[in-house]
Image: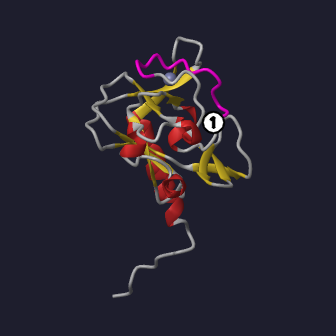
Amino acid sequence: MPSPHIDKSASILTDDVGCARQLNAGNVCVLDTGDDRGRGVFAVRDFVPGEVVIIGLLDRLETSRTTNSIQLNWDVHALFEAPAVIVNHSCDPNLAIVPNRFGAYDFISIRAIYSDAEVTWDYATAEFECIGISNCGCFAANCRGVVGGFSKLPPDHRMLMSRFCAPYLRQT
Ligand SMILES: [Zn+2]
């Protein structure tokens, strides 16, 4: 029996990316938030804590911070593909970031999320300095008002205590 030909050059990775995009499309959708934050990302099904809600995929790397970039390392910033790039900040988020196999971050549920709820993450868990938001409009009871990035978080902040932050920041 001849062994089946496996063309390793033909992008197992592309299929992997395709699967990730499909998973994202089955989990969330992009809608207008109805307030001055513009678009946001919303759950299209229920999630229990600990589920991967969005698989982050890199669009392109940037050498400097932009208002839409997400920080991966001290001098490494990236634009993520939608929907990840569209997810709004909250000071009381329902998603946390964890590094993934694409060199980006996955966004996992840290509490129960019900269908139609907006999903959010705390930008300060990746950005050492945050320039994307000058004044936070997240409406959370613990809203920090100004989202200054990781460098401005109090050391006892729960996102730091839980270690849900970019790995490069864990060495600070
Ligand atoms: Zn806030």
Percent position of residue 21, x then y: 48, 45
Percent position of residue 61, x then y: 68, 52
Q: Main secondary structure of the magenta part?
A: loop
What amino acid does circle 1 point to? Cys
> Where are the magenta residues, as a range?
130-142
**Residue 165 visible within the image:** yes
Residue at 38 percent across and 87 percent down: it is: 2
Q: Nearer the viewer, residue 19 or 51?
A: 51
Percent position of residue 159, x then y: 41, 40
Q: Nearer the viewer, residue 43 or 94?
A: 94
**3 inside magenta stretch:** no
Q: Which residue is mark 1?
A: 130
60 in relation to 32, above or below: below
Q: How is the image coloured?
A: secondary structure
Percent position of residue 109, x then y: 34, 38
Disc 1 crowd rating (10 Å Cα; few below 14, some 14-19, many 20+) is many
Residue at 52 percent across and 11 percent down: it is: 34
Report the side of 45 relative to 16 (left or right).
left
